[in-house]
């Protein structure tokens, strides 16, 4: 289903699935992360802390997308990688 909840016709064999278009949600994320980072830096937050915060936000967003799109089978390796990164291994 698409974002506007209108029904999506099934794909035919002669029409391969096309990649989703770059839309408002992707544009908002691409713009908001640098703007938020700049605002936090101007507010006095250290750059290292900004990277940690925004990386965590990005990881949560990626995890949510994977969970919705690919289910538990694809989420398990991502969760393991995050745990290894947090543990410093």
Image (cartoon, rainbow, N blue to C red):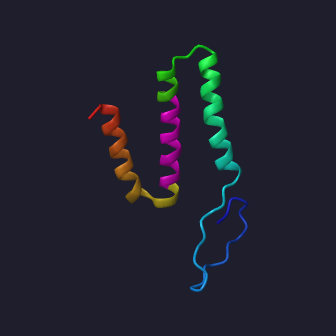
On the image, the x and y values in percent for residue 69 come to: 51, 59
50 relative to 89 in the view: left or right: right
Q: Main secondary structure of the magenta part?
A: helix
From this view, report whether residue 6 is shown above or below residue 41.
below
From this view, report whether residue 67 is shown above or below residue 45.
below
On the image, the x and y values in percent for residue 28 come to: 68, 43
79 relative to 46 in the view: left or right: left
From this view, report whether residue 23 is shown above or below residue 84.
below
Please tell me which residue is depicted at 59% across the width and 19% down the height of the picture.
Answer: 41
Residue 43 within the segment the image draws in magenta:
no
**Front in this rendered view, residue 70 or 41:** 41
**Front in this rendered view, residue 4 or 17:** 17
Q: Which residues are magenta?
A: 53-67
Q: Residue furthest left?
A: 89
Residue 8, picture quadrant: bottom right
Please tell me which residue is depicted at 63% across the width and 25% down the height of the picture.
Answer: 38
On the image, the x and y values in percent for residue 79 come to: 37, 45
**Image quarter of the N terminus:** bottom right
Residue 71, picture quadrant: bottom left
On the image, the x and y values in percent for residue 9 come to: 67, 77
Please tell me which residue is depicted at 38% across the width and 48% down the height of the picture.
Answer: 78
Please tell me which residue is depicted at 58% across the width and 78% down the height of the picture.
Answer: 16
**Image quarter of the C terminus:** top left
Q: Residue furthest top?
A: 44
Residue 62 within the segment the image draws in magenta:
yes
């Amino acid at each position: 289903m698409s974002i506007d909840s209108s029904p999506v016709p099934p794909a035919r064999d002669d029409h391969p699935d096309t990649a989703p278009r770059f839309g408002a949600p992707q544009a908002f994320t691409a713009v908001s992360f640098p703007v938020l980072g700049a605002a936090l830096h101007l507010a006095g937050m250290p750059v290292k802390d900004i990277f940690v915060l925004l990386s965590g936000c990005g990881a949560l967003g990626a995890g949510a997308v994977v969970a919705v799109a690919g289910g538990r089978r694809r989420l398990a390796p991502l969760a393991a990688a995050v745990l290894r990164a947090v543990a410093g291994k």
